[in-house]
Amino acid sequence: MKKIEAIIRKTKFEDVKEALLAAGIEWFSYYEVRGEGKMRQARIYRGVMYNTSCIERVLLNIVVRDKNVERAVAAVQQAAHTGEIGDGRIFVIPVENAVRIRTGESGDIALYNAEQEK
Amino acid sequence: MTTLLTVLNAGNTAWLTMSTILVMLMTIPGLALFYGGLVRSKNILSIIMQCFSLTAVISILWIAFGYSWVFGTGFHGTGLGAFIGGFDKTFLQGVGITSVMAPSGVPEITFCMFQCMFAVITPALIVGAFAERLKFSSFLVFSILWTLLVYNPMAHFVWGGGWLQQLGALDFAGGTVVHINAGVSALVMALMLGRRSDYKPDRPIAATNVTYVFLGAAFLWLGWFGFNAGSGLTADGLDANAFLVTHLCTCVAAMTWMAIDWICSARPTTVGACTGAVAGLVAITPAAGSTGVLGAMMIGFITACCCYWMVAYVKPKFGYDDALDAFGVHGVGGILGSILTGVFATAAITGGAKGALYGDWHQLGVQCVATLFSIVYSGVITFVLFKLIDKTIGIRVDKRVEEEGLDIYEHGENAYN
């Protein structure tokens, strides 16, 4: 069981969502996040110019079974790619356990619906 | 001034009533949105509450005795009459449904309401200077005292038959009374109050909601037609001209600011264009009843250049925190408009008085006297009021309150939940 954290461009969110669905990843959570980085963007307020290093991105939080990690990472990487600096990063983190609140099932089974999967 | 013999003029009355409504729109929602959009989201309600409560408080004050102090005639002819009108119209005593103003033929009640909206917006303009760091209680005390001691006497000097009016100063709709008064007081407040704790001159605090800034500027522009074109109290050619020059000057100022923005900062910004428009509106205010097309365009251009220079270079250089540029726009715009009135006033509009451009340097001198006087007068009294309030009830919020925001600590609510 792994958690995939992916920081992607806001504009790429829809593409990534579709790619993940196509790869069989049916659920994940995401947040709008702000980060600091090398990128600078000029802002102007009443004639005073200043730079901001604040970068707005979307952070995806995907928990998958080990067998799906590669597919999910590849889906995000391909869909979020533009080739410009600032495309983001993907982190894969081990997850100890998962519990489905409705049934109390724990382990891999908590991540997917057994009846639907062949 | 009033006589029962004057016949009521329905056309003038209708237009003045309309103008009164327009001028009210300038404070709420105009100024509340314009200033509210410029501060951070933790303080937007403090601005809205300040504008909203002022509308009510100053109106009550105005009807109680403000109107009498400015336009009363009780002290007429006495030494005191130069400073205040009198107490004869306190609580609108004797101002009945049959009182009609001469020569415009509007009910005195309508005139009183129209002037009431001017008294309301003037202290509201100062809000921009001390935004994000003034206690609400101190704000109320300050605004009430300021209206009594600065606005009312100045309005009497210029409009109520006081010495500046007798001197021949041209101030059609309130360049000195409203904008210089408020602008200079704003500067004094900003200087004495000091910066917001996290303000750095080279790094402006970004506006919360530029959409509100635009909405506010649009309401100000709209309302200003009542402010300027209603100030003649009649629906005639002079008011039509005021309508025209108000619009033209604003357009020129907005586009000038946009062009400078484009050249100096490489981008035409929304906040910039809105600020330019407001600067133009301020500057044309005293001149609306005395200049034509040429004057309006020149005043718009000159004002936008000067105000831009003021807020983009002078303010960061000196490092004072006039948070929303109440001085940079209203003070500087008002001073320029008042003086330039003495340059561009034309006999074709005024029917007599003319400016330096048309050979009458005397008018320019009179304008400078009126301008200087209002700068000194409002500056000094504001200084005294600040000291008085700061020593007694304290004027600035605690550091913690300033950091967390005035909305939650002063008003117990958040704008966005």
Image (cartoon, rainbow, N blue to C red):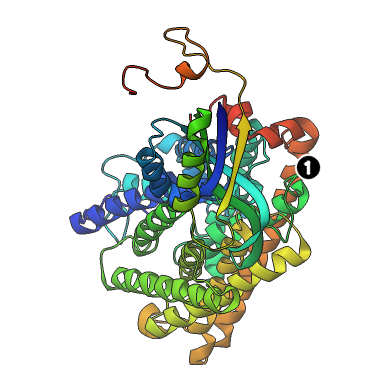
Quarter that holds the N terminus of chain A: top right
Quarter that holds the C terminus of chain A: top left
Q: Is residue B380 left or right of residue A65?
A: right
> Residue B391, how many percent across, how many down?
80, 35
Q: Is residue A7 visible?
A: yes
In which quadrant of the rendered view does residue B12 lie? Answer: bottom left
Foreground residue, A113 or B414?
A113
Foreground residue, B171 or B280?
B280
Q: Residue furthest top?
A: A104
Residue annotated with mark 1: B387
Residue at 38% in and 35% down: A24
Q: Is residue A77 left or right of residue B382?
A: left
Q: Residue furthest right?
A: B391
> Residue A106, how many percent across, how many down?
51, 12
Q: Is residue B30 left or right of residue B192?
A: left
Tally of numbered tags: 1
Q: Residue furthest bottom?
A: B359
Residue at 70% in and 64% down: B315
> Residue B160, how many percent across, how many down?
49, 56
Q: Residue furthest front?
A: A118
Specify the amino acid type for callout 1.
Lys
Mark 1 residue element: helix
Foreground residue, B408 or B143?
B408
Chain of the residue that carries numbered disc 1 in the rendered image: B
Q: Is residue B120 visible?
A: no
> Residue B205, how many percent across, how many down?
64, 52
**For mark 1, does the 10 Å Cα neighbourhood hold few (<14), some (14 to 19), or many (20 or more) residues?**
some
